[in-house]
Image (spheres, helix red, strand yellow):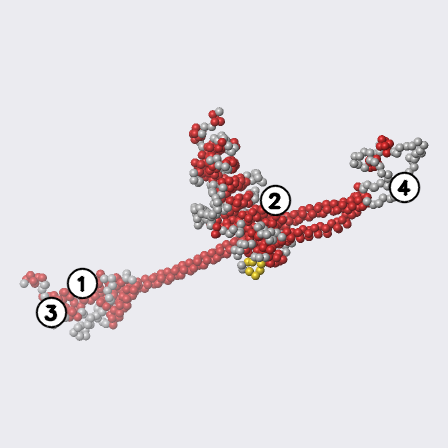
Amino acid sequence: MEENDDDFFSDDGFDDLPPGTLFQLEQNAVLANQAAQPQTQTTAAIGQPSRAFASHNIQAAASEQSFLSNASLKPPAHLHTGLTGDYGALDVGELDAVVLEDETESMRGLDQPAVPTEQSGSYQVNPEGEGEQAYPVAMEVEAEASHTKRGHLAYGIINDKLAAENERYKRLTEELVAARSMAETKAGEIAIIRSNQAKLAENYERQVAALRKAMAEEIARHKEEVEAARAEGKMLATENAFLKQDLADESMRISNLKAKGRAEEKPAPGTPKKHKALPFRDGFDDDEILAVSPSKSTRYKRMSPTVGGKRKRRLSEDSPIPLELSPQPEPMHVETTVGDMSDDALDEAIPNRTAHVDDQSSQLVKRLLNHRTFPNENSDIEVMARLTFPSEPQRTLSSILLEEVANLDIGSYLLEYARAIISLWSRALREKFFEPVPTFMGIMRHVLALDAPSSASKLIEHLVPLLQESGEVNGIPRFKHSPVSRQNFGQVRQTPLSELQPLVNSTEALGLLYQMACSCLHIDRVLEKFWRYMRYDFILMMLNCSQSISDIILTLNLLSTSIRVESFGSVQDTEQDQIANENYIVDRVANLLSEMPQVDEGQPPYMASEICDMRLEALSLLTSVAFNQEAPASTHGSMVIASHSTALARLIRAMHDELDALYASPPEKELHAELVNGLMRLVYGVIRRHPEHVDLQSKLSRVAGGKQKFLVVLTRLAFSEGQILEAGIEDETVEMAHEILDDAVNPQEAEALLEAFPSSKQQE
């Protein structure tokens, strides 16, 4: 029992205390614990967010009002539980446990971030219903109020700062939005200004280009007018000279007629002449000779024989009537007659000239209307009188033709008739009505033959596009079946006859184009106009190996008329397009030297001589392009060939193939030898003209087997002796091959070639 007394302390001291003192001690302990708890909670609440602090502030205010309205706080109900006046039933251990629990709760409140204010500021009512309340000491209440006010002040300061920062943030945000909006507005304005400036610049460039084009057209038109005026002046001068000559001839004829009339007049009566025998018998009139220079012997022979005793006539006695001789026309008299008759003769010659021109026009009309196109036996007008367009079957072609001619007023019936034929021709192609096309071609060929120079230059803009369109009727189907088309790339196919139109002869159309180009050769301006209307795609299409050989040869001949000082081929608008067009032409013509032309379906293959003729025409064109005969100093064409990526390599490959064909000794070996010599001259000339632009090895590598064929053909030609199979090879070709081979191989390769190809000339 003693040990238990030591553990649970003695109650002697508490027994002596009165009940009121013990209650006061308990109340002070409770109040001390409650005063420490609000201070801790206020300090912790200052560092919390504003929302928690606001709730704490409201609760603290409610607690403060409860403190002010009450004088003291009620003690906890469980402290009064079991207290009696005589302590008979009071267990002190329970009181200590309650005190420890209160301390634990106060420490737990310090650890938590926020404690509800109702725990510190609330009071508890005695569960027994007693009306007594416990109130804190005045000093403790003031300390709690001061802590609350400081918390309120700190929260107010922080809240003001936060509001100011929020306002500043809001203001900065608005300023940023306004600045961004202003920047976007400025950027949009700048973009609009730049767009307007670009449009203005483009409009200005377009206006300048239009003005330049109009000025160029005006200059060209003025030049054409000047050229036309000059040509008309020359024509008038020529006509004037002809008129003067006709006038002089007419005047001379009139004067001769007048002189002849005077000579034939009846002479005056005189002594009749006795018929005399002409002694000379030389065919001349002896009287005229005697009148000029009579001789003594002649005079002696002319005298009648004398009779003795007869009296002679005196020489001084004249004949009673003088003998009149025929007057000879004097030159001065003739000139006077010409001068006197010039005005009258001119008045008579001018109507004669007009009548002659009218007669020529009528003859021209008759020739046009009476023309027949082979194999028709009727005239063209009669043939067209039986034909009608599918879209207008009620009218014949002849009636449409005559109506078109009547509506045109060009000043020349020939041109009016040609323009009407062109209109009908174009309509026939649009409606795919090909039956009258051969007749139209025959008429245009006849028109160009009648007056080629003047009519061709005035029909270029209408006839040249129409002839190209006619050539495309069969040219396009043939091109679609060629190995270079997209549909049959790399495949060789013959063109079916069902896709061709035999009535539209492309060879005839190309022949008319070539005839027009040849008639314009002497006038550069007209020739340039002709090639401006020639499309480059039409030329390239007609140079394809699937076209007929006759069409290819005519196209090559046509291209030969396009060679100018600084360009060739179709005239393009820009220099870049012109250079590209010239490269395409060189590439296509170089391919013709090795490609095999294809025939249409069901046609026999071409002969080797025909193929050689075509390749000779291609070689002739390339030679004319490289070495312009009209401008020998011009290097434009040779520069195009030298700068082309594969042209020289293809020429060398063609030379190798032709030399191989020559070794086979065919019937056309002379043509193969001519090709070899021409190709060597072309290659050698281009290399010597532009050595800095010719990288022969790189060009040869772009053609299959180019390097090997180069060495083989040059070695064969360099060591050729010109005998038997090589009889057609010229000595110049051998020398050129030597020079090119020396530049292309190194000394070791040259020695190896000399050992492999020993020459009889070197052995000698």
Nearer the observer: mark 3 or 4; the answer is 4
Residue 249 falls in image quadrant: top right
Nearer the observer: mark 2 or 3; the answer is 2
**Circle 1/circle 2 CB separation < 8 Å:** no
Q: CA distance from mark 1 to mark 3?
A: 23 Å
Q: Amino acid at mark 2?
A: His
Can you say whether 503 is above or below 115 in the image? above
Residue 104 numbered mark, or none? 1
Q: CA distance from mark 2 to mark 3?
A: 149 Å
Marks 1 and 3, the one that precedes in the sequence = 3
Secondary structure beneath dot 2 equals loop
Marks 2 and 4, the one that precedes in the sequence = 4
Nearer the observer: mark 1 or 2; the answer is 2
Residues packed near mark 4 inside 10 Å, few (<14), some (14 to 19) or many (20 plus): few
Quarter of the figure that contains the N terminus: bottom left
Image coordinates for residue 550, horizontal then vertical, percent:
52, 45
Q: Amino acid at mark 1?
A: Thr
Q: Which residue is mark 3?
A: 90
Q: Which residue is mark 4?
A: 321
- 117 or 586: nearer the eye? 586
Side of 382 where 127 appears, left or right: left
Q: Amino acid at mark 4?
A: Ile
Secondary structure beneath dot 1 equals helix
**Circle 2/circle 3 CB separation < 8 Å:** no
